[in-house]
Image (tube, helix red, strand yellow):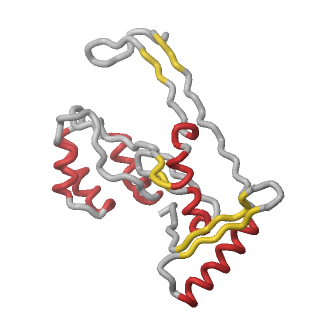
Amino acid sequence: VDPKIVERDKLAEFCEFASKVLEMPASKIMEICSDDRSRFSWIKRHLNTEQTRQLTPYVNTVRGLSFQEEWRRFYPLSKALSPVLGVVGTDQYGLAGLEMKFDRQLRSHPGQIWSLRDARRRRVSLRPVKQVAAKRGNDLILTIDRCIQTFLYREMEAAFTKYKPASASGMMMDVRTGEILALASLPAHDPGQ
């Protein structure tokens, strides 16, 4: 929401409706929408498809309301590989594992466009004053073998359940090349959650 331009006369109705859809108090939504110290505030992040569908009529008709699309990471083998891959926070910075170690190399950089605007923030010219193209992040190629990783994790999980240690870790390596084929540790978390 942009609290500086949100239509105040439609706000109470929106807050009542949104409180049911988002399962949060209407007073909290009103507080967020009324705090005009900034030009952007989240009402709620990570809406599901049904919530988005229900709120769309308001977003399409009430000035100042909008959806902000966010990317979500997909982690292959989720728990089986999570200690290796690590995780990113809501700001998309790596917090653990390879995500943290190689964050600068993996990170993409958004493009930027500078344009002239009048006092009402309308574009004066369709031609940008300055433009910087977006830069894609680098890829990181691992030597982890999906089948071996799954096998190692499954066997470790069985031993972990049977013997109940505080933690466990295991690694499988190709001794001729030094390639890491599987690397796991327990307890593990699901990085997609």
Left or right of residue 76: residue 93 = left
Q: Residue at x 45, y 52 (%)?
A: 95
Quadrant location of residue 159? bottom right
| Residue that sits furthest to the bottom in the current view | 162
| Residue that sits furthest to the right in the current view | 176
- Nearer to us in this view, 151 or 71: 151
The picture places residue 160, in percent across and down from the top left corner, at 56, 83
- Nearer to us in this view, 176 or 63: 176
Quick check: 140 above or below 166?
Answer: above
Quick check: 155 above or below 56?
Answer: below
Q: Residue at x 40, y 58 (%)?
A: 51
- Nearer to us in this view, 111 or 177: 177
The picture places residue 145, in percent across and down from the top left corner, at 75, 61
Q: Residue at x 37, y 52 (%)?
A: 45
For the N terminus, the image quarter is top left
Left or right of residue 4: residue 146 = right
| Count of numbered labels shown in the rendering | 0
The picture places residue 97, in percent across and down from the top left corner, at 53, 55
Left or right of residue 1: residue 28 = left
- Nearer to us in this view, 51 or 192: 192
The picture places residue 192, in percent across and down from the top left corner, at 51, 61
Q: Residue at x 57, y 56 (%)?
A: 85
Quadrant location of residue 41? top left
Quadrant location of residue 158? bottom right
